[in-house]
Image (cartoon, rainbow, N blue to C red):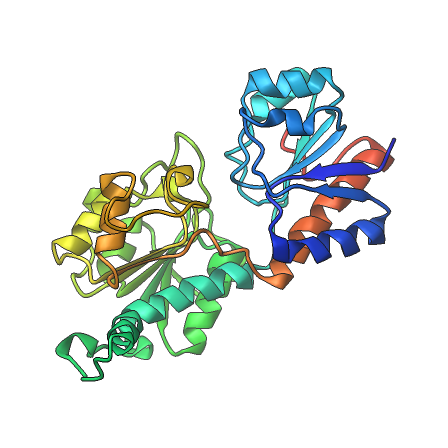
Amino acid sequence: MEKKMICFGCRGYELPYFKSLGEKYGYELVTRPEYLNNDNYELALGYEIVMIRGNCVLDKEHLAKLKEKGLKYYLTRTAGYNHVDVAACKELGIETAFVPGYSPNAISELAVTLAMMLLRNTALATSLAHQGKFKVTDAMFSKEIRDCTVGVLGCGRIGRTSAELCKGLGAKVIGYDVFVSPACEGLIEMKKTPEEVFTEADVILCHMAYVKGQNDKFISKERLALMKPTSVLVNVARGEVMDNMAALLAVKEGKLAGLGLDVIDNEKVLFNKEHDPKAMPNEESQLIVDLYPKVLITPHIGSATEHALIDMIEITIQNMEEYRLTGKCKNSLIK
């Protein structure tokens, strides 16, 4: 087998890492900045191995066309895999695998940063200072994190890392997960229902994995209504787990003090593009812009750290090596 892999969605700062890790494992990694999709699938024609990221989406028809030209392995360098048509890959005989975990600190640090910016009103203060306004206003008054209860939705590795960071700052941490890991003991006070978390928390950090058809809009209008009007919410997991419009309206109506986002549903409408802030693509994205600094958004940068990047590329190559040497992969998405 030729050890050659085409990799899509490669940003400029990532290229040296692709080069060094390719050399480490003896792979020729062909890097492309484009996100692979149905319109540009021809870029992957003739390659046996394709590496993608979260914004790359191919349907069954175009996967079949790549299969006809030699595609055997379709690997995502992400933990989430709702962008991969696993059923189509299985039917077409294309092996597909994912990265079950990478630096949890990368996501947790961003979640806590957004939460602290909202809690301490630093985006408001710095934006006013940028305008030459250096007066302390009533809107800058805040609680300290040590006097807050932080609620964590999704208490896997990333959720637990966020809990550790918040406890290190003195906060009480509560949480909810359908599966309670023994690792949560002594770290997170687990609640039996998500409603308890929404009711009690001053800060909520969402780290839930998205399972289509099971937890769509888990953070619903009804659950948002349980939150304190002084509380803040941060979603760095998947956009699909939250009713984004309901959360934005809660901020607009004064029922939620702040909202931090690194993910939204249907990200391709907004992310990786430049927009006129006065003429955004839709009502939701217009609200996101208009509600600043009570709404803070970053363009899915949770994994944009050196440690996380190395993990994602290296584990993907290791997945391929496992296929090459054994014909199987423990991180396969095909069960």
Q: Look at the picture and state if 334 lies above or below 142.
A: above
The one nearer the camera, 231 or 191, is 231
Q: Position of residue 185 (x, y in %)?
A: 48, 63
Report if residue 316 is visible in the image.
yes
Q: Position of residue 249 (x, y in %)?
A: 17, 48
Total residue callouts: 0
Q: Residue sitting at 41 percent across and 49 percent down? A: 177
Where residue 65 sits, quadrant-wise, is top right
- Determine whether, in the image, residue 102 is placed left or right of residue 24: left
Q: Position of residue 57 (x, y in %)?
A: 53, 31
- Determine whether, in the image, residue 177 is placed left or right of residue 74: left
Report if residue 225 is visible in the image.
no
Question: Could you tell me which quadrant the N terminus lies in?
Answer: top right
Q: Position of residue 217 (x, y in %)?
A: 31, 39
The residue furthest bottom is 135
Q: Residue sitting at 48 percent across and 66 percent down? A: 109
Q: Residue sitting at 74 percent across and 25 percent down? A: 72
- Determine whether, in the image, residue 210 is placed left or right of residue 230: right
Question: Could you tell me which quadrant the C terminus lies in?
Answer: top right
